[in-house]
Image: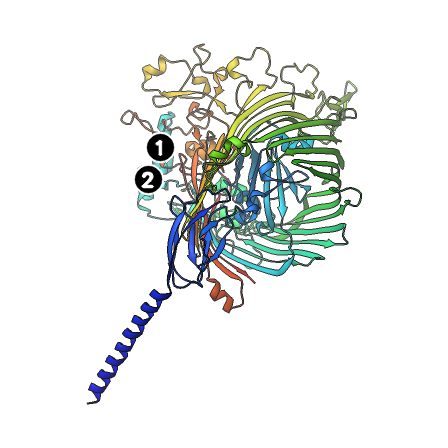
Amino acid sequence: MNRNKMSFGHVKRFAFILLFGFCQIVLYGQNSKEINGTVVDESGIPLPGVTILAKGLNFGATTDFDGQFTITVPSENTVLVFSYVGFITTEKSASDSSFEVVMVQDIQSLNEVVIVGYGEQKKATVTGSISTLKGAELTEVPTSNLSTAVTGKLSGVVTIQTSGRPGADAANIYIRGLSTWVDSSPLIIVDGVERASFSQIDPNEVESISVLKDASSTAVYGVRGANGVILITTKRGKEGVQNISFTAELGGQTPVNIPNFLNSYDHLQLLKVAMINDGKDPSTEPLLSDESLEGFRLNQDPYLYPNIKWYDEVVKPMALIQKYNMNVSGGTKRVKYFVSMGYLNQSGMFKYTDMHDRYNPDTYYKRFNFRSNLDFTINKYQTLSVNVSGRSGEQNGFPNESNVFQTLIAKAPYLYPIFNPDGTYGANIQEPNPIVKIANSGYDNTRTNDYDVVGTLKNDLSFVTDGLELLMNMSYNSSVGSTKSYREQADSYYYNPGTQEYQQIIEFSPLSYSGETSTGSYRNIGLQFQLKYGKTIGKSELNTTLVYNQQNERYSANSPFVLMGYAGRVEYNYDSKYLAEFNIGYNGSENFAPGNQFGVFPAGSFGYVISEEPFMKSLKPVIDFLKIRGSVGLVGNDKVGGDRFLWQGLYSYTAPGSIGSYQNYSFGTTNPSNTGGLVESRSENRNLTWETSLKRNIGIDAKLFKNNLLNITFDLFDEHRTDILMSARSLLNTTGIPSPQYNIGETKNSGFELELNHKNNIGDFEYSVRGLYSFARNEVVDRDDPSGTPDYQKLAGYRIGQYRGYQVLGYFTSEEDIANSPDQSSLGGPIIPGDLKYLDYDEDGQITSADIVPIGYSNIPEIVYSISPEVKWKGFTLSAMLQGAANSSVLFVSNAGYEFGGSAGGGQVTETHKDYWTVDNPNASYPSLHSNATHSNKNTNSFHLKSGNYLRLRNVRLSYSIPESFCNKLKINSINVSISGNNLKTWSEIDDFDPETVSSDGSKGEVYPQQSIYNFGVNIKL
């Protein structure tokens, strides 16, 4: 009975729900409204793909190709939101009678500002060649160093990271390749003041980065602008509500491209083959006996037959990296502020650093960053800005850390065990144990403190005349570092498994303090005045800037020197269509002799915004913006290397040496006494000067389609660098005095850059793609080649730093082939079938140093490129970057390339060496094996010169912004969580090493490897 009543109750409720739902449908049908409309721009041109959303409701529509749309809304009170890339978001009530929606282009994007030397300009009217990057893009890259965070993000910029060591992992930066063999480092400017480096700045402090590349943009820096200029602008507070941002990141670092060396058995098998090839008897080597080889194959006794993969034993699979930042910004009409504090803790990747609690030899790096940027409005006409920043770094590690990697690559796996049976360290007389170096040799602790203070007083002189402004800037920058060293030694023994006896190789010595040494100091005091004037009359706009700049710099114990200069810029544009700019720098440097200390560096540029012409209006749907620009000018480079006063003659005192030495004086005849004296070690040359660079550039900036679907920037450039400092090579040295330096070097460099940006949205799905491609090729015009040098061995006509060696034709296939080929036995023998066969370039029947020719490229790539896609959908953002380089070479010699490291059995061998030439394997990838370190095969040659081309999955990032409704409940503005990775995968022809961490001489695959970083982060804004 009750059950029937209950069932009937359900039926009543169900019927009520149906009735209620039906009524709702009827009411909706009565109140709903179908809206048909069109969306156009200010010129009346239809906009396709505009997103239309009902505010607060989960539905919407998009416009078709003709800008038309249809949408049904529940009532006339509904508000429609119209959004489109490049236009201001517009809201419109459904009750409006007219539904032609006019969208206005985002003025902010039109007036986007670019930071330039001593000022800023509208991007639309810039005539120089400048690459820009927003600071927000830097914080998305999980890296410990700001210089590596810019990789692949700026056109024309080449970065090469040669080491992954914590605290020493900064990238070398080249702008538009190489134009000199002396010093190619760019000028670094932070908030208008020159700095020695920017790599240790916290990315959370950076507002933007501008890279100045052509003469027009760098001429105001005169004698220091030839290598390009990097401008770092840090964040400032804005008037409004206070903003607090906290970021925490925790990541794991793993070494990339770890070499895969062979085990002891395979190693010794190859050594046996190499000894036979060298005409040696393997039976004289006990390790190569059948019994011994079988013991290694079966791993019978780890003490008698060691098999140590040293790299795997020493290097951790993962180490931690932590980053934290908190910044506060805001302000009133009177005071604006930005204050930031950051902390980085990067662990090292070595095992065995925690074997005792007396000290920590781990190769860690810790850094604390602080910045306070304050702006005070003193009165109607004056504003004072004060920037105070600092960095405190601590770098720790065991002594001679770089030598450990050399040991790991050079040390054969069979030499001795890590630990003896009694737990002591294993060793032998010739080879120290790398574990001892890491865990029990002491440590070096280096602390560096940097302080920067910049004060800028901005004076509005409009009471004198409209548009007049005076800026006064004073700056102080210092850097001081020192290293405290502690040393100890642990007992190490050679254990003889046969006799079970121990022979002490290293005797214990306790940890002791061995002193403190300076790692260098730097101080820079600057003074700067800027007078600016701007005037607009009708459609004409004129802006002028005059600058006086003075710096007093001092490095360590060197003599201080002063840089002084003037700069000027005149900008003119008519109707934002016809653009012209003239820049000039007049600079002086104490590096040069009086009379040669000052120089003038002028540059001019033009621009033509052709899209503003009336005849282009019909193309507006396709070409929204098109600017043609060009520049030409002179800039200088005073980084000429050498001593402080390189132009002066130099005398050196030599202590008493052997009787008859030309550097000593001998008195007497029977029993002569030998006395030291002064020796002229350098001749005077008062005509020394800076390098001079003539730069030319033509560029195009284009925005295609009305909503700027595709932005294109293209630059074509060339450079002629003269007066490069070098020692004369064509003069005979008949005096015994080293040749003085002369400004006789000359190069040329040319190339192009292309940047493409595409951004669009389909409803609430947004996507963008950015592509960069840069090419720069240099050529030595004059490097004072000695007379009589064959053309093919001259430096002129070839690339800066291009490798030189023997050109390999292939392998010798037989004894007959060897007999019928030019004799190369003088390079090291014996020469056997399977050895490398060299080109007899001078055709004299012998292979000698006269046959050395240019081969491959240099180690600096001519081509760099990247592609960076990004998608956004409902709070999720997924981004990535593929970055690569081409037209570079990597030389593999010594331990990094040769079998057995170039020494008889002492080094390592890899899978590459297993595929060696034999009669049965004529198509082998490696020539015949030799244990002889001086064999012909082990000369620098094109076989050991590998392609440095690579493609990297540089970074991937997935982030999610927590819904605003949830954050509001917590009284938090926003929460963003992310997972990301950096340096995740590399594709190259080099298997065992990273193409960037092998040095130009090929001997240094033995450095701290680059790191892959896997990162989790959270950002909270209050």
Q: CA distance from mark 1 to mark 2?
A: 10 Å
Left or right of 379: which side holds 743?
left
- Near mark 1 (Cα within 10 A), the count class, few <14, some 14-19 or many ≥20, is many
Residue at the image point whose x is 72% and y is 43% from the top: 523
Residue at the limit of the structure toward the front, as seen here:
97
Q: Quadrant of the N terminus?
A: bottom left
Tell me what residue is drawn at x 67 percent, y 47 percent: 481
Answer above or below: position of 994 versus 2: above
Q: Which residue is mark 2?
A: 293
Q: Please say if 796 is above or below 765.
A: above
**Image quadrant where one finds the C terminus:** bottom right
Nearer to us in this view, 891 or 246? 246
Q: Is residue 631 visible?
A: yes
Furthest residue to the bottom?
Answer: 1
Give the SS element for disc 1: helix
Q: Position of residue 690 (x, y in %)?
A: 69, 26
Q: Position of residue 780 (x, y in %)?
A: 56, 21
Q: Amino acid at mark 1?
A: Lys
Report helix, strand or loop for mark 2.
helix
Q: State if disc 2 and disc 1 touch (CB < 8 Å).
A: yes
Structural crowding at the residue carrying mark 2, measured as other residues with C-alpha within 10 Å and reported as few (<14), some (14–19) or many (≥20): some
Whether residue 386 sits left or right of residue 60 in the image: it is right
Q: Is residue 355 visible?
A: no
Say whether residue 537 is left or right of residue 928. right
Amino acid type of the residue that numbered disc 2 sits on in the rendered structure? Leu
| Residue to which mark 1 is pinned | 272
**x, y percent for residue 866:** 46, 38
Give the mark nearer the N terminus: 1 vs 2: 1
